[in-house]
Amino acid sequence: MTSIRTDIRVAEPLAETTGDDQEWRRRHLLDLDDYSIDELDVLMRTTDTMKEVLSREVPRVPALRGTTVVTLFYENSTRTRASFELAGKVLGADVINISASGSSVSKGESLVDTVKTLRAIGADVLVMRHDRSGAPYLAARHADCSVVNAGDGLHAHPTQALLDLYTMRSHLGEMRGKRVVIVGDVLHSRVARSNMWSLNAMGAETVLCAPPTLIPAGIGSGEGLLPPVRVETNLDRAVEGADVVMALRMQTERMHGGFVPAMREYSRLYQVNGERLARAQPNALLMHPGPMNEGVEISHDVAHGLQSRVEEQVTNGVAVRMAVLWLITRTAKSGGRASTAKGAA
């Protein structure tokens, strides 16, 4: 006679295990530039709950049953798009994937019209990636649904920064006073910008390292629209005593002109390798938002070494995006604030 298992946790209601979201009142996630430490803590704790769901033998809950999540991507993506799709399905949502190349956008339809059309067919959450900075803000103003920024131009990539923060906290605990070095093409990196905001809110020290041509103008001087950071053009000095070293790829697809003399020269001066990582703290985390160009910004041995947390970042991305979908959907359904103004997005 076949025994029936009774210990498989299936469809446990999240409301009973996610009671720490009283500080969350947002129905959009557009950037992290005005997020408080309390809001970030709520998201981190909710991600813990989602990690527990993913660890179940049957990783599915009906938390977002009846909710329609639409991913609208105007740029190519593997990690972000797949993790949002899986996040929605794990929570029981209906997920529809749309690429700009296969939609009416290719026929000349405007972004506003596309967004209104998707809302008219029943989209509750719009997860959007666009090559133009600010596009998700425009979408949020014209759509009566929640909007999640999955990367816009050179501006922001908030869920990547959140999964980076979650990965760091999982190993380092309290981030206040921790030193995080971000090295590479900072100028064209929306990931770096969002990480600056989240790390600054959590009290970490952020060090940016790149050739002068790949550092945004005014950053590090206290001027401009980005949080205070330290700028260092010498990688050997930058990584001294670092708790986290995050490498960024050269985004040649966004470059219009020569920002470095040659890629070989760039790799010689700015590649994160074993010798340089040894200058950091003994158990420093090695991170990369992906995709990696091994042999350019990061050496093969480091990318797949014991200190690498790259695959863990990808895994954590699903739980973080589950937490985002859950929190903004609850706010929207309870009549939470919908303004896209600063402080209320």
Image (spheres, rainbow, N blue to C red):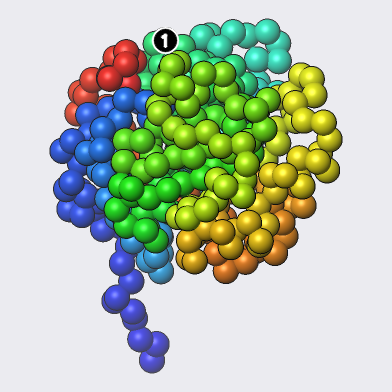
| Image spot of residue 116 (x, y percent) | 47, 12
Q: Give the residue drawn at x 30%, y 47%.
A: 176
In the image as oriented, which residue stretches furthest toward the bottom?
A: 1
- The amino acid sitting under disc 1 is His
Asked if residue 49 can be seen in this view, the reply is: yes
Tell me if residue 270 comes above or below residue 256 in the rendering: below
Asked if residue 122 can be seen in this view, the reply is: no
- The N terminus - image quarter: bottom left
| Image spot of residue 314 (x, y percent) | 53, 52
Q: Give the residue drawn at x 15%, y 38%.
A: 22
Residue 81's quadrant in the figure? top right
| Image spot of residue 190 (x, y percent) | 54, 29
Asked whether, in this view, residue 68 is left or right of residue 265, the answer is: left
Secondary structure of the residue carrying tag 1 is: helix
Q: Give the residue drawn at x 31%, y 41%.
A: 203
The residue pinned by badge 1 equals 142
Asked whether, in this view, residue 281 is left or right of residue 289, the answer is: left
Q: Give the residue drawn at x 63%, y 56%.
A: 276
Asked whether, in this view, residue 315 is left or right of residue 188, the answer is: left
The residue nearer to you, when weighing 327 against 103, is 327
- Give the number of callouts: 1
